[in-house]
Amino acid sequence: MLRYIVRRLIQLVVVMFVLSLLLFLWLRSLPGGPDSAICGERCTPDQRVAMRHALGMDQPIWVQYFKYMGRVFTGNFGYSSGVEPGTPAIEVFLHRLPATIELTIGALIFAIVLGIPLGYFAARRKGGIFDNLGIISSLVGIAIPVFFLAYLLKFVFAVKLGWLPDSGRQSTDLAQPATRVTGFFVLDGLITREWDASWDAFRHLILPSIALGTIPFAVIFRITRSSVIDVQNEDYVRTAEAKGLTTQVIRRRHILRNAMLPVVTVTGLQVGALLAGAVLTETVFAYPGLGQATAIAFQLRDFAVLQVLVLASAATYTLVNLVVDLSYALIDPRIRTR
Amino acid sequence: MPLLEVEDLGVEFRRRGLEPFRAVDGVSFDVDPGQTVGLVGESGCGKSVTSLAIMRLLMPRGNRVTGRVSFDGTDLLRLPIRDMRDRRGRDLAMIFQDPLSSLNPVISIGLQVTEVLQRHRGMKQSAARAEARDLLDQVGIPDPDRRLKEYPHQLSGGMRQRALIAMAVACRPRLLIADEPTTALDVTIQAQILQLLGTLVRENGTALIMITHDLGVVAGLCDEVNVLYGGRIVERANRHELFATPQHPYTHGLLASIPRLDAPAGERLHPVQGSVSDNIPWTSACAFAPRCGNEVDRCRSASPELTAAPLGHGHQLRCFNPVLPDGAGVGATGGSAPVDSAGEAL
């Protein structure tokens, strides 16, 4: 098991190296660059040359790459030129990470709390009205563009009805400014007993979580449904019935537990994707997470920040997958004892 | 008084756009306490469906079960499902064909045994654990303490079947149904499992319904044998009579199809010709007629009843033209025959 983990981690390092090179080349092959973003439209050619020199952009690309990698190994990922100018890129990443994690958790709770029970229920009444409604709505959930759904939610619940805030992570008009401890706003409020701040941050999370969680919800719903349908026809469920076990035990112990195996895998893949940052959702709700930073960094050609964000998301994706594989072993003894 | 009386049991599967399929068509038989009764026939003859219907384990939708299954005086088919759940695993238990797929792969053997004990005997965790240990020991699983903690994939095929048997006999049921319990096992293990079943049944006075296509199993274990064909019982006799004087052409075919070790090498096997798909409905003919070497005109125009056989005591037969030891069919010429008149008399 340990060897397996080590092997996976070595794979991760290789992936990161290759990715960093590709990313570096690709970003620099794009039209425009941080120099024009910083100088603006009306700078003179001389100013631009000076700026390119200051940024080291006048050197051959491979020299730039090796210098960059050299700095990376000393922990210096460069400085943001556009998202938060002058801040180390790694810091931009680090202080936006909690926001994205919070949103990911929100979206996942929405997806899991709805997806698994509804999927189970649909499977038990396969072919019924509820099942068909569920299939249709999950289809809509996958098909509807996220930004459209996000605007729709925002328009209805924030603008028209005014039930929930329309953007950001925290209101600016709190009675007293919220204290920051961990960077997870809901958690911070609980730790410092600033209940209003915690509640406010929670309310800010609702709409983005729904918008972001819709696709994972649809995926989890469908996988749960088909998995439960498969499992409830298994011979061992019939054995459990033949033993006269109560419906409750049969469902929980014999059906759900087995049916959860594929659901865990799929959910894990979703987590990986969500943690990379939800560009569309965060942009629509002006939510200051990694997704929003990615969008801004791209517009402003903030290479340093983009590089950190993309590499970090690749790393999270791989690590989350590793965790999913390991958790699989927890539920399935056939993998654990091999 | 019999422990189990199955009377006119019928199972129909509804099929979209087609006539419902009658998998079991008026099957009746009794099982006395401590008795072992065999249900024998090829795949598709309705033997497994019969057992599932008795246990009420058929999928709740898409089928219709008729008739009566009286267990110790209670009609199981009319029992509220809650009460049926109370009885399953406690009064009647079942062992299935494929031990690997019949065990839950992600739960330890220990929990799969103790859950029955906790459910029906109200045992606490620790007591159930100790009892489960004894049960595994009883069914011949070596090192039961270790096996309790293991998972099905870690056990050998024979041990898995033993574990399933342990679960089935955990509450000392009065009736045990074994649905081809040895089919998935190799021959030496088969013999061990059969011996184990025989011992358990004798020691606990449990009645056993043995479902099999293997006449060897029948010969070793059953007191009485019912041969099923096309959802109906075509021949019923005690074990000795069935092997000594089989009279239904189908039973004959089954016996003749067993390859013999003393036959010369290279001799052809003797399968029963055709397959179940050749069946014609029982309604106005004998379903076996298309595959029967012994058929007469009546077989295609009238449906035979289960009646006393020309030979033997309590031997019953559903045939117009049985195969008799001297080789001459009783009704071969006209089909009048004592069989038939006995049928009308009954």
Image (cartoon, rainbow, N blue to C red):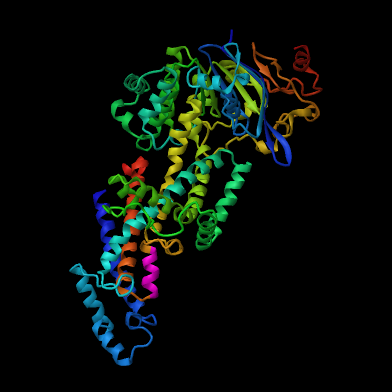
The answer to whether B185 is drawn above or below residue A211 in the figure is above
Residue sitting nearer the eye, B217 or B252:
B217
Residue B82 position, x and y percent, is: 55, 22
Residue A72 position by quadrant: bottom left
The answer to whether B320 is drawn above or below residue A266 in the figure is above
- Residue B83 visible in rendering: yes
Residue sitting nearer the eye, B139 or B116:
B116
The answer to whether A121 is drawn above or below residue B55 in the figure is below
Residue at (39% x, 54% y) in the render:
A104
Residue A149 position, x and y percent, is: 53, 59
Residue A10 position, x and y percent, is: 25, 60
Residue at (59% x, 44% y) in the render:
A131
User: Hey, which residue is sitting farthest top in the picture?
Assistant: B1
Residue stretch rendered in magenta on the structure: A291-299
The answer to whether B129 is drawn above or below residue B106 in the figure is above
Q: Quadrant of the C terminus of chain A?
A: top left
Is residue A89 located in the magenta-colored stretch of the structure? no
User: Hey, which residue is sitting farthest front in the picture?
Assistant: A175
Q: How many marks?
A: 0
Residue at (49% x, 55% y) in the render:
A215
- Residue B96 visible in rendering: no
Is residue A295 located in the magenta-colored stretch of the structure? yes
